[in-house]
Image (cartoon, rainbow, N blue to C red):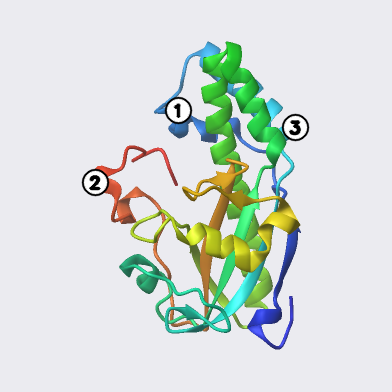
Amino acid sequence: LHHPQPEQVGGHMELTLSSPFDYREAYPYLGIRGTPGQAVEALTHECARKLTGAARPQGVYRVFALDGMALRATTLVFEGEDIKKHLAGCHACLLFAVTLGAAADELIRAAQVDDMAAAVTLDACASRYLEALCDDWCARLRETFSSEGELLTTFLSPGCGDLPMELQSGVLTLLDAGRQAGITATSSQMLLPQKSLTGVIGLHHGGGEGLARGCAHCSFAPRCAYRGKCR
């Protein structure tokens, strides 16, 4: 990843976990606190096995220099107070889009036909698996960039806080995500495949921190239906 200009850093990525996916991490997404019954645990374990077997995680990323809240040499300008805080002290940002692939969506849809309990559990496993892959990849990316004197913030996704969901299409276009990873957005800015995620990471030399992740730090937490279920 050693390149002289930010705009030249990027590419396609295959996502893998450095350790096996822990199905129990899906419990909060199911509204479960503590230890569930044996039947629920067995179902979650089986759904996680099927999900991780069907998924084909991949994505794309690209680094852009920042001029304020504008991405240099593009027409994209970030809006919202949360992204300003997230990128405070940053000289560049990394855009990314990742997906579990169409097969993961198809697995969930198939279960919706005759087993809604499995469908809901598969959906929860897919959501956590996607975030676990992102977290793992970001950790490795942080190590790579730190060797070049660059520090990375956490990631902030469109639709989180007051970062507009409408940003999705612009991010996907800049990343050429449709061609490179099969990720597109509908007219309502929902990503396809559905188990996909876009994000913004700030690059700095010690003057930035980025927004902390989690409900305690989200400006939408008081009115969020998913409070306590996300990370």
The secondary element bearing badge 3 is classed as helix
Gap between marks 1 and 2, in whole Å? Answer: 20 Å
- Asked whether, in this view, residue 225 is left or right of residue 86, the answer is left
First in sequence: mark 1 vs mark 3:
1
**Considering only vertical position in the picture, is 222 above or below 153?**
above
Gap between marks 2 and 3, in whole Å? Answer: 36 Å
Q: Residues within 10 Å of mark 2 (few under 14, many from 20)?
A: few
Q: What residue does disc 3 label?
A: 53
Q: Callout 3, which amino acid?
A: Gly
Q: Residues within 10 Å of mark 3 (few under 14, many from 20)?
A: few
| Residue 58, percent from left and from top | 71, 51
Q: Which mark is residue 222?
A: 2
Q: Which mark is residue 30?
A: 1
Q: Callout 1, which amino acid?
A: Leu
Residue 110 seen in render: yes
Residue at (64% x, 33% y) in the render: 105
Which residue is more in the foreground, 187 or 87? 187
Q: Callout 2, which amino acid?
A: Pro
Q: Quadrant of residue 139?
A: bottom right
Residue at (42% x, 84% y) in the render: 68
